[in-house]
Image (cartoon, rainbow, N blue to C red):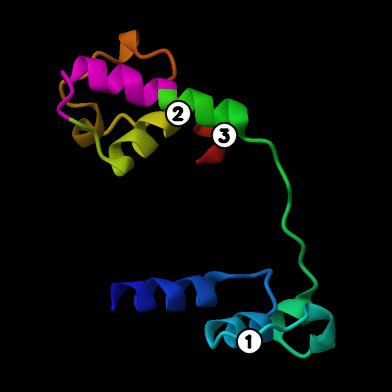
């Protein structure tokens, strides 16, 4: 059931894919977006996803994760904590037990905040 919830959430949040295409594919049918003739909200809006190479940012995040795990002796880190550290948060919850001076990628994603 959780998969259905996630599927519904993806449908609602999607701003680019033709709604008719998504609906019909859900029921196992093929539908060409060209046949929508701009009748759904996404096709009417005509938005196109922006293509960007975020390889450098991904590498920085992985380095940040490695640095945090080293300091925490492999005890793990949450996605929320890594996100906060990448953005440069100074919250005690995110920075607890960490020496930020030894994490070079701390705050590297400030521009995404």
Left or right, 6 with reference to 59:
left
Distance Cα–Cα, label 1 vs label 3: 42 Å
What residue would you read off at disc 2?
A: 61
Q: Residue at (17%, 26%) from the top-left corner? A: 96
Percent position (x, y) of residue 54?
62, 35
What residue would you read off at disc 1?
A: 29
Q: Can residue 88 be seen in this view?
A: no
What residue would you read off at disc 3?
A: 111
Is 66 part of what is drawn in magenta? yes
Q: Are marks 1 and 3 in contact (CB under 8 Å)?
A: no
Left or right, 107 with reference to 32:
left
Displayed quadrant of residue 93: top left
Distance Cα–Cα, label 3 vs label 2: 14 Å
Q: Which stretch did the figure color magenta?
A: 63-75
Displayed quadrant of residue 45: bottom right
- Judged by its main secondary structure, the magenta piece is helix
Which label sits in the foreground, 1 or 3? Answer: 1
Q: Residues within 10 Å of mark 1 (few under 14, many from 20)?
A: few
Q: Residues within 10 Å of mark 2 (few under 14, many from 20)?
A: many
Q: Residue at (59%, 70%) from the top-left corner? A: 14
Is 95 part of what is drawn in magenta? no
Percent position (x, y) of residue 4?
37, 78
- Number of numbered tags placed on the structure image: 3
Going from N to C along the chain, the mark reached first, 1 or 2, is: 1
Under circle 1, the secondary element is loop
Left or right, 11 with reference to 86:
right
Under circle 3, the secondary element is helix
Going from N to C along the chain, the mark reached first, 3 or 2, is: 2
Left or right, 82 with reference to 12:
left
Percent position (x, y) of residue 16?
69, 69
Q: Residue at (70%, 41%) from the top-left corner? A: 52
């Amino acid at each position: 059931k959780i998969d259905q919830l996630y599927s519904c959430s993806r449908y609602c949040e999607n701003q680019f894919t033709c709604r008719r295409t998504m609906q019909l594919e859900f029921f196992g049918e093929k539908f060409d977006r060209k046949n929508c003739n701009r009748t759904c909200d996404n096709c009417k809006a005509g938005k196109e996803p922006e293509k960007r190479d975020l390889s450098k940012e991904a590498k920085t995040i992985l380095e940040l994760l490695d640095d945090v795990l080293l300091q925490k002796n492999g005890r793990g880190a949450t996605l929320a904590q890594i996100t906060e550290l990448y953005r440069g948060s100074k919250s005690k919850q995110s920075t607890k037990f960490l020496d930020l001076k030894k994490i070079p990628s701390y705050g590297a994603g400030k521009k995404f905040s």
